[in-house]
Amino acid sequence: MEFMDVITTRRSVRSYLNKPIKKEHLELILEAGRNAPSYQNRQCWRFLVIDDPKIIKEIGANTGLVGKINFFIKDAPVLIIACADPAKSGGINGQDYYLVDTAVAFQQMMLTAWNFGIGSCWMAALSEKKLKQALSIPKKIRVVGMSPFGYPKEKEGLYGKMVKVFAGSNNRKKKDDIICFNEWKL
């Protein structure tokens, strides 16, 4: 896929085929995250890769902020938990960069996955406490987000359609609404 096609066609996927991800593709996805830029190249991110279907189903059923909101991950062949060690990052101007660093690395992973036809869905509606307990993540580590990774079903499920309507996923702002040159004019 051409790079801008990867950028412009990537979407959140919430319905997955029962098809494993090729090992070499998963390795390249993880390598993309490993090679991301970070605050003073400290590379504070840590990624927990779950490929055991039982664990993925358990996480989907028990780690949402409300009820079983993350149930849709149950069919994904891989779930990646994006974590960070804040002590291995830094801050400037009152901003903690572990969040930025981990988000950049995770986005690179998602774009690489999409290039192979593998969908993902950035998820933040999770209980960090429950995830840490379920997966033995140390107290000092922060969970920044998680995403299922898998091949999208041809037809999106009802849940995915509803979330996209609720979130306004098809509504992209115009460039003039978000970009100005040389001085603030927004």
Image (tube, rainbow, N blue to C red):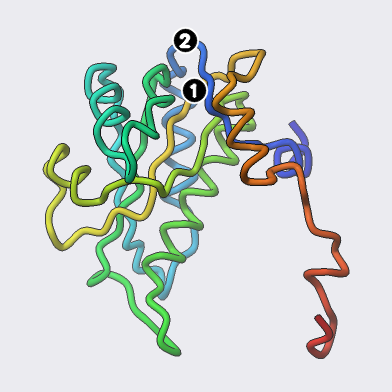
In-front residue for pair 63/162 = 162
Viewport quadrant of the C terminus: bottom right
Q: Earlier in the sequence, mark 2 or mark 1?
A: 2
Q: Which kind of residue does numbered mark 2 sit on?
A: Lys
Left or right: residue 131 versus residue 75 is left
Residue 91 in the image, given as x and y percentages of width and height? 37, 82
The local secondary structure at tag 2 comes to: loop
x and y percentages locating residue 135 in the rendered image = 16, 38
Left/right of residue 12 with respect to residue 104 in the rendered view = right
Report the residue at 52% width, 33% height from top. 120
- Left or right position of 104 against 83: right
Please name whichever residue, 68 or 178, is drawn nearer the observer in this view of the structure: 68
Report the Cα–Cα distance between label 2 and label 1.
7 Å
Query: Which percent across, then down, holds residue 112?
Result: 57, 37
Front residue of 141 and 67: 67
At x 31% / y 35%, what residue is drawn? 67
Image coordinates of residue 169 in percent, x first then y, are: 68, 43
**Image quarter for residue 181?**
bottom right
Query: Which residue lies at the image location 66% right of the left edge and 13% below the top edge?
Result: 154
Label of residue 16 in the image: none
Q: Is residue 172 above or below residue 58?
A: below
Q: Residue at x 71, y 38 (%)?
A: 6
Q: Quadrant of residue 2?
A: top right
Residue identified by numbered label 2 = 19
As drawn, 183 above or below 11? below
Identify the secondary structure beneath mark 1: strand
**Dot 2, crowdedness within 10 Å: few (<14), some or many (≥20)?**
few
> Quick check: marks 2 and 1 in contact, CB under 8 Å?
yes
Residue 45 higher or lower than 153, as above or below: below
The amino acid at mark 1 is Gly
| Residue bearing the label numbered 1 | 150
